[in-house]
Image: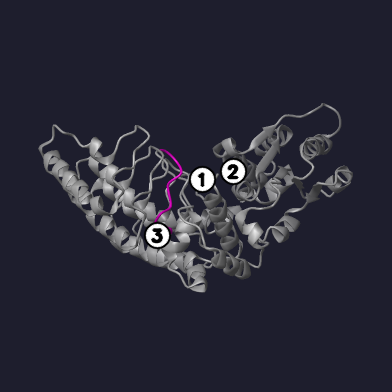
Amino acid sequence: MGISDVIGESIKKFREERKMTQNDLAEKMHLTRPGISNWENGKSEPSSSQLVMLAKIFNVTTDEIVGNTLNNKSAVIVDTSALIKRPAIIEELIEKFNEVIIPQIVISELNNIKDNKKNPANAQKAWLILSSIEKVKSNIDIRENISGNGNNDEKIAEIAVERAKKNYIDDVYILSDDIYFQFLTKTQKNLKAITPKEYSKKFHKLDIQYDISKSIEFCSLVKKREIKAVEKLELKGIDINYHDPEDGFTPLIRAVRNKDITMIDFLLNCEEINIDAIDKYKYFFSAIHHATQLKNMEIIKKLSDAGADIDLGSKGKNSGNTPLMISAWSNFIEGVDYFISLKACTNQQDNNGYTPLMKACINNHIESIKKLINITDLSIRSKENKKAEEYLDKENEKSLNIIKLFKEVSND
């Protein structure tokens, strides 16, 4: 990871911790929102004077922003009690810690809880937690027991102590509601047992305990377009960014897929809305990706005006797709024009190394090509070591005119 990426991730992390949008930060920095987006995506870096200003805004040091922290890592070992209390915490932990470790004994305990019909509420929570673990298992470490000695808490503590001893400058935590862990870990200086409440305070998260059943009900009402029922709900305790277990969509993404303008307006006005949250479906798209896929300019503009990241890449299959790339691929000219007008990055590449222009060339979309050819670096090559014009179908008559266009631009 380069220094630009480190700085970008730091800026995004500190901004989100302070509940600031990119627009909020841009106003404080006297910049445009795309400028903040370029920083956060590692496309450019703030100047030294801008770093000082950022440090003042975030109340941190410039060293913290540039990642100069002795390269120590943070790790968290998660206990069953913490997961049951906050089933949606796993993805948050992945963002906050370099390593998330879940002992195999915890997996076994969750399976037992899931199969316990005497406590259906906890059984449902355990099912949701196990489903979440399965989806993010490439980003977590399922750690086998070190020995067969002791009770379950002692086995979990043994794993934590071993991890702490691996590197003494690392910060290692056990996240648990069981205070017994404070006794089990007291001899290891770089290991600390913290409760979910202490975690919330230490890592700048609001101490909100989400009600899973209410969050699921909220998703259901949004899906059914029942705006009046949604407006009557007391949102305290409801995770409005909750991923529906059935389709992996957040309420905002579902409202976008439904083209439900009234619901979208309501959600965008909610204080805790994460406009850039991605779904857990096939492509791992954000709301603005979905709006672009639907070619709905009204919704695209609403999301953009609300601060959606127009250069955000998708995370799933064919990762790295931006809204501009989606527009170019499908020859959605209104979308191409709009994202260009917002200074979307035309040289950004997806996981295959494709730029928006390359995607237009693959499909011989001459209209999109004409929009992009003069504002794209034509020397960029994909992972197949091809430039944009090399993706044109020379057997297609349309391509002949496009090839001439490339030659004209190159000669200029």
Which of discs 3 and 1 lies nearer the camera? The answer is 1
Q: Secondary structure at mark 1?
A: loop
Q: CA distance from mark 1 to mark 2?
A: 8 Å
Tell me what residue is drawn at x 50 percent, y 49 percent. 244
- Residue at 79% from the left image edge and 42% from the top image edge: 168
**SS of the residue at dot 2?**
helix
Task: Give the numbered dot on residue 292.
Answer: none
The percent position of residue 179, horizontal first and vertical second, equals 84, 50
Residue type, mark 3 in image: Arg
Q: Residue furthest left?
A: 397
Q: Is residue 343 above or below residue 106?
A: below
Q: Which residues are magenta?
A: 309-317
Magenta span includes 74: no
Give the main secondary structure, helix, strand or loop, of the magenta stretch.
loop
- Give the mark nearest the N terminus, 3 or 1: 3
Q: Count up the numbered dots.
A: 3
In percent of width and height, residue 59 lies at 65, 68
Give the residue at mark 2. Answer: 128
Q: Residue at x 56, y 68 (%)?
A: 49
What is the quadrant of residue 387 in the picture?
A: top left
- The residue that label 1 is drawn on is 245
Q: Earlier in the sequence, mark 2 or mark 3?
A: 2
Give percent across and percent down for residue 208. Answer: 65, 61
Amino acid beneath label 1: Pro
Q: Mark 3 sits on what residue?
A: 225
Dot 3: element: loop
**In-image side of 227 versus 385 (left or right):** right
